[in-house]
Amino acid sequence: MTQAHQTRCGFVALIGAPNAGKSTLLNALVGAKVSIVSRKVQTTRSQVRGIAISRESQIIFVDTPGIFRPKRRLDRAMVVSAWGGAGDADVVCLLIDARKGLDDETKEIVLRLRDVKQHKALVLNKIDTTEVEKLLELTQAINALCPFDDTFMISALKGHGVETMKEKLADMMQPGPWLYPEDQISDAPLRQLAAEITREKIFERLHDELPYQITVETDSWKNLPDGSARIEQTIFVTREGHRKIVLGEGGSTIKAIGAAARRDIAEASEQKTHLFLFVKVRENWIDDPERYREMGLQFPKE
């Protein structure tokens, strides 16, 4: 038999409302950090691909932005990206926070999924915080609105049910060659992942003080003779007041953000890193088409 017949490969889209746990689940499925996690809503802005292997199958998981009612241009771009990820996948997994249940936001997503022709799987997350009776009632209510082909009950944070879910998804992949090398876990360049890691650390430290209209760009990545990397990044905010918040008194906040980001970037790149952060004001970046292209989003014209 040829390699193409021995192996399977396919795409699985993870969709859902903001903070359902999609990024946490993606990292658990892949077994490494490929998507940033934050309690701030709409942290994931564009599609993030994580690659996992289960037996003969290579599964390319697509973490999409949370689906919500868009109010601003960036919101609209993110929601379009999320549904685009669902349309391109072989299997669509709807992730729902079992504690929240079937609220209006999730109900809208479920109803729209009736038009999706691909294999659909319902994933109830955070089951460790929810009574079994409620899980069963929730599953029944959701399937009454839109029939799902499979249901998985998991805790992405604790890992409960994640391996079983991955194995079953592996069986759904179509025969064909793998699209990525066996040891590759993401299709995102390290420069992009490093920028996202720094953005995650900003949110962790300044969750209640900054709006989510903040972006980070990796300006340079230079590998040094000793095997370490010198990385320069710029944090862009929309107001001078936000720049002062990120810097902190005497630069204390930016130093703490840099230290936390440096640790995760070093782990992701498997090399010692020297991280240098700069903070600049870019007032109208949210209306700049170039910024959207850098984030992997389509720029909404209206």
Image (cartoon, helix red, strand yellow):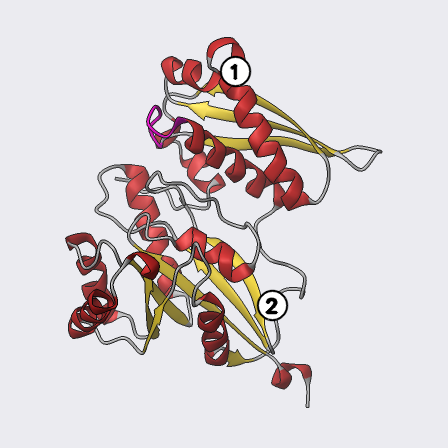
Give x and y (percent) for residue 44.
41, 45
Magenta extent:
206-212
Q: CA distance from mark 1 to mark 2?
A: 44 Å
Residue in the foreground of this view, choosing between 197 and 87 = 197
Question: Going by the picture, which residue comes out furthest to the top?
Answer: 250
Q: Is residue 9 left or right of residue 85?
A: right
Q: Secondary structure at mark 2?
A: loop
Q: Amino acid at mark 2?
A: Leu
Mark 2 lies on residue:
179
Q: Kindly give the residue lying farthest to the bottom in the view shown.
A: 1
Residue 137, position as x, y percentages in the image: 18, 69
- Residue 70's mark? none
Number of the front mark, 1 or 2: 1
> Residue 153: x, y in percent?
35, 68
Image quarter of the C terminus: top left
Is there any visible trace of residue 29 in the rendered image? Answer: yes
Residue 19 vs residue 190: left or right?
A: left
| Residue 273, horizontal then vertical, whole percent | 69, 33
Q: Secondary structure at mark 1?
A: helix
| Viewer-proximal residue among 63 and 22 | 22
Q: Quadrant of the N terminus?
A: bottom right
Q: Which mark is residue 252?
A: 1
226 shown above or below 189: above
Q: Is residue 208 magenta?
A: yes
Looking at the magenta stretch, what is its main secondary structure? loop
Q: Residues within 10 Å of mark 2 (few under 14, many from 20)?
A: few
Q: Amino acid at mark 1?
A: Ser
Q: Earlier in the sequence, mark 1 or mark 2?
A: 2
Name which residue lies at 80% across and 37% down: 227
Question: Is any part of residue 278 visible from this angle?
Answer: no
Q: Is residue 46 left or right of residue 120?
A: right
